Each structure stands twice: as structure tokens, then as C-alpha cells.
Image (cartoon, grey):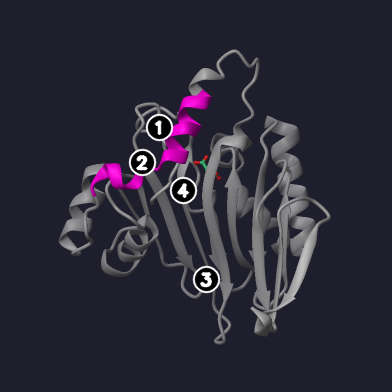
Amino acid sequence: GCGSVLNVNGEVEMDASIMSGKDLSSGAVSAVRCIANPIKLARLVMEKTPHCFLTDRGAAEFAAAMGVREVPREQLVTERSRKRLEKEKHCKSAPKPEPQKHLGTVGAVALDSKGDVAYATSTGGIVNKMVGRVGDSPCIGSGGYADNDIGAISTTGHGESILKVNLARLTLFHVEQGKTLEEAAEVSLGYMKSKLKGLGGVILVNKAGDWAVKWTSESMPWAAAQAGKLHCGIDLNATSITDLDLL
Ligand code: ASP
């Protein structure tokens, strides 16, 4: 929502998806513009329609029908995101842009007390993207996946690479084949890097409460809460653990 990265026209265009591992129910939206929390709209698609995915005008009409408040588009554009776009536009001289530096995705995975897992992924995409460009985040199997029998995963990174390898489902496939969450993440991210030079990151959780965080991009801000402890980090090999009671 507010502060999303901007497309080439300086507009916010967002994608989001959500899935429940209990029954594989899922909902997604893409190219939505005047909504503060696209992930809530994705959830409404999951819960209130017989469909999985609504886009653009249809998604906007559905949001209005559900009573989701429309936000004036300028309200979602921040000074920071405007500067980021300007910088990107002026960086054309760079021989090869590093896409992982210009992304803005928020992802979550969860395991609840009933043993159900779920994921949610929401993004503005890639700064300076073409109007109408849809990335991996709203695509079930790429931007995330959840199945109680395997686990839940949310992904981030270079959308075009993530789509091509179906990063979320690919990682869970490796889990199904007997790898640990950590090993599975390493193998699938490694595959994406060697095949496409695509960089990204994943967070995963399974029914047993095991979780893993892995990325091949330069850094990835992440946090995990389990058994009263908050684990978090941004850079490789720099994890801090705090007692949740102390916060
Ligand atoms: N994966 C997103 C996209 O390509 C960007 C990101 O993860 O930040 O749309």
C-alpha cells in the first residue's frame, strides 16, 4: 500500500496473494491501484468468491462491492518512493541494473494452534516496471504456497525469475522429497540463480513448527517469532534473538 515502489508512470500498482494450507483455498489480486491493503482484498477473493484471482478493473469493482475504502492514489505515493523512481530512471548508465535492490515485497508465513499453515505475500513489484507488469507475488506457486501436509512459504526477489521456476512450489517439492526446509530453500534458490541468474529469498514454516529463512540477494530483512523469542536479521550471519516479553 502506502510507500509501494512506483511503476514507470510514477503510479502504485500492487499485487498480493494468500493461501490456507488447510484446504488449499487461495485468493489473489493484481494491478490494484487505490487500495491501502491489497492483501485484505486477496483474502476477500479467497473467502467471498468462487475464484482465485481477480485483476485490474474487476478487482477494483469487487473491492467497491465489498465496501473496501478507495484511497486517493497520491496518498499511497511517498517522497521516498518518488525519489527511488527518479534515481532508477537516472541510473540508466549502469551496465546491468541489479533488480534485487529495487524491490518492495512483504511476505508472511504462519502456523496456528490448530496446526494449520498459511502464507500471504504483497508487493508493489519492481520500481520503474512497465504499466500492467505482474510479478510472481500474486501467482500461487510462485509468490507463495501453503499445504498443511508440507508447509507454507512466501517468496521475494526477481519476479520474472521466480515465475519461471515456480519458486514456492519448487521449494516445497524438495521438502516433499525429504529435504529439510533449509536444504530445500537452498536447492531451489540455487537452481534459480544458476539457471537464470535470478536472486531472491524465501521464508518457510511447517506443521512441526520448524522454520527457515534463506536468500541469495544481498540482504533480506526478516523476523520470526516462536516460543516467546523473536529472531530477526537483515544480513547474512547476523541474527539477533530477543525475549518477546522484553519488547
Ligand atoms: N517479487 C516481487 C516482484 O517481482 C518483488 C519483490 O519481491 O520485492 O514483483
As drawn, the label of residue 51 is: none
Earlier sequence position, callout 1 versus callout 2: 1
Q: Quadrant of residue 176?
A: bottom right
Label 1 sits on residue: 7
Which residue is the site of mark 2? 13
Q: Secondary structure at mark 2?
A: loop
Distance from label 2 to label 4 (Cα)?
Answer: 9 Å
Q: Dominant secondary structure of the magenta stretch?
A: helix
Is residue 225 rendered to the left or right of residue 70? right
Marks 3 and 2, how far apart at CA? 27 Å
Residue 27, position in %: x, y?
Answer: 38, 60
> For the residues marked 4 and 3, what is the alpha-carbon distance in whole angstroms?
21 Å
Residue type (three-letter) at the residue carrying disc 1: Asn
Question: Which residue range is magenta in the image?
Answer: 72-88
Q: Looking at the picture, does residue 6 appear above or below residue 181?
A: above
Q: Earlier in the sequence, mark 4 or mark 1?
A: 1
